[in-house]
Image: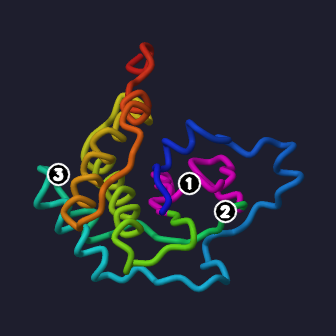
Amino acid sequence: MRSGGPLLCLAASVLLATDAMAADQPELDCDAPAPQVQTPVTRADLNLLIGWIALKTEYDLTSVYRNPPEIVFCDVGDVVDYEAEGLLVDELLSATYDLSRRRITLVQPWTAEDPYDLSVLLHEVIHAVQLDNRDWPCIGAPEWEAYNLQALWLAEHGVLPVFDWDFVFTLSQCPPDASD
């Protein structure tokens, strides 16, 4: 099973595809599913996750329920659009949430039948909900809550969450000048 989240991976691996990397790695369009077969994300899957978030948080989920983020699939090695930059998808990355496009990108293989994979989608839907409901002082600030909710969901589904909590805590801390 993969572990880690989008920002965790961003901090731990290559953040952006540089011009040199872009020359070596063609940018792929992830608007269409990659040719590899994956389980599609159904509206029922999303409703299950949104309902769970509603039970566990105080957030207003109306906008995410009525207009859920777009969900696309990519493969390790792809370069995907992420917040107006190119992001090289490495083997540690499970998914991303791009706020500017309201797009969740799930890294293949992914299946809704696997509780861990479903928790990866949950983590990204949590980000959509978090960012729809409030402003955060820095990009990493929502991670602590998202990982804790993901861990709770996994535990409720009989899966032991294996996250590097020290790293997640560090990742979720804003630099001193973040609120400026």
Which element is circle 2 on? loop
Estimate the x, y position of residue 64 in percent, counting from the top left: 28, 64
Of 84 and 104, the residue lying toward us: 104
- 81 on left or right of 141: right
Which element is circle 3 on? loop
Of 106 and 28, the residue lying toward us: 106
Of 163 and 87, the residue lying toward us: 163
Q: Circle 1 is placed at which residue position?
A: 93
Q: What amino acid type is highlighted by mark number 3? A: Tyr
Q: Which of the 4 quarters of the picture holds residue 112? A: bottom left
Residue found at the very far top of the displayed protein: 176
Q: Circle 2 is placed at which residue position?
A: 76
Cα distance between the residues tagged 3 and 2: 33 Å
> What residue range appears in magenta?
78-104
N-terminal label among 3 and 1: 3
Q: Considering only vertical position in the picture, is 80 above or below 18?
A: below
Cα distance between the residues tagged 1 and 2: 8 Å
Residue 107 magenta: no
Estimate the x, y position of residue 33 in percent, counting from the top left: 60, 79
How busy is the neighbourhood of tag 1: few (under 14 within 10 Å), some, or many (20 plus)?
many
- How many marks are shown on the rendered structure? 3
How busy is the neighbourhood of tag 2: few (under 14 within 10 Å), some, or many (20 plus)?
some
| Marks 3 and 1 in Cβ contact (< 8 Å) | no
| Marks 1 and 2 in Cβ contact (< 8 Å) | yes
Q: What amino acid type is highlighted by mark number 2? A: Val
Q: Considering only vertical position in the picture, is 142 above or below 96?
A: above
Residue beneath the point at 62% across and 48% down: 84
Residue 82 magenta: yes
Q: Circle 3 is placed at which residue position?
A: 59
Residue beneath the point at 14% across and 61% down: 54
N-terminal label among 1 and 2: 2
Residue beneath the point at 68% across and 42% down: 16
